[in-house]
Amino acid sequence: MSSVTLIGEDLAKEGLEFVFGGCLSKCKDCELKNSCCGLEQNRVYRVTGVRDRVHGCKVHHKNVKVVDVEHIPVKTAVSGRTAIQGSMVTLEDKKCNTIECENYRICHPVGVEFDTKYNVEKVGKKLECPIGRSLKEVELI
């Protein structure tokens, strides 16, 4: 599903992926805040189109541009028994600090919140876990 938002002029490039961190207090009185703040906080988006329209902004050093964005799935790891395409899962913190593990980034992805429900869009391969957990790679939306 596509949305329209505003991002910094220098960032407004098709294909850019970003995590929307939410609105700043400086945005509270801005007449364009509904356009900037309409995305879901802590979700990953990809710019799919850049429009010609430019606006001034108190936050960005330059102007902001109007862009089309889409919410994109996040790859992560879930328990093998809950990895069912089309199901809802509550993403839990793995409580693992083995940062040298090849799966650390997928177990601790950017753009998700733990203890939050997500839809499993795609189930991938089984992951090798050095501490013995049964994990599968999934794409969540």
Image (tube, grey):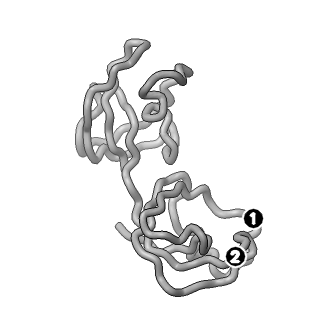
**In the current view of this chain or complex, which residue is farthest to the left?**
85
Q: Nearer the viewer, residue 62 or 137?
A: 62
Q: Residues within 10 Å of mark 1 (few under 14, many from 20)?
A: few
Q: Is residue 6 above or below residue 120?
A: below
Could you say where residue 32 lies in the image, as x and y percent from the top left? 63, 80
Task: Residue 89: name its quadrant.
Answer: top left
Q: Nearer the viewer, residue 98 or 30?
A: 98
Q: Nearer the viewer, residue 7 or 15?
A: 15
Q: Which mark is residue 62?
A: 2
Q: Is residue 108 above or below residue 9?
A: above
Could you say where residue 117 lies in the image, as x and y percent from the top left? 42, 43
Of the residues shown, which amino acid type is indicated by label 2?
Answer: Lys
Of the residues shown, which amino acid type is indicated by label 1?
Answer: Ser
Q: Which residue occupies 38% across, 70% down?
A: 2
Mark 2 vs mark 1, foreground winner is 2
Q: Which residue occupies 41% across, 14% down?
A: 130
Q: Which residue is mark 1?
A: 25
Q: Which residue occupies 39% across, 56% down?
A: 72
Q: Are marks 2 and 1 in contact (CB under 8 Å)?
A: no
Disc count in the image? 2
Q: How far apart are labels 2 and 1 at the CA level?
A: 18 Å
Dot placed on the residue nearer the N-terminal end, 2 or 1 = 1
Could you say where residue 87 lies in the image, as x and y percent from the top left? 27, 42
- Element under disc 2: loop
Could you say where residue 83 lies in the image, as x and y percent from the top left? 28, 33
Task: Residue 79: name its quadrant.
Answer: top left
- Element under disc 1: helix
Q: Quadrant of the N terminus?
A: bottom left
- Residue 133 left/right relative to 9: left
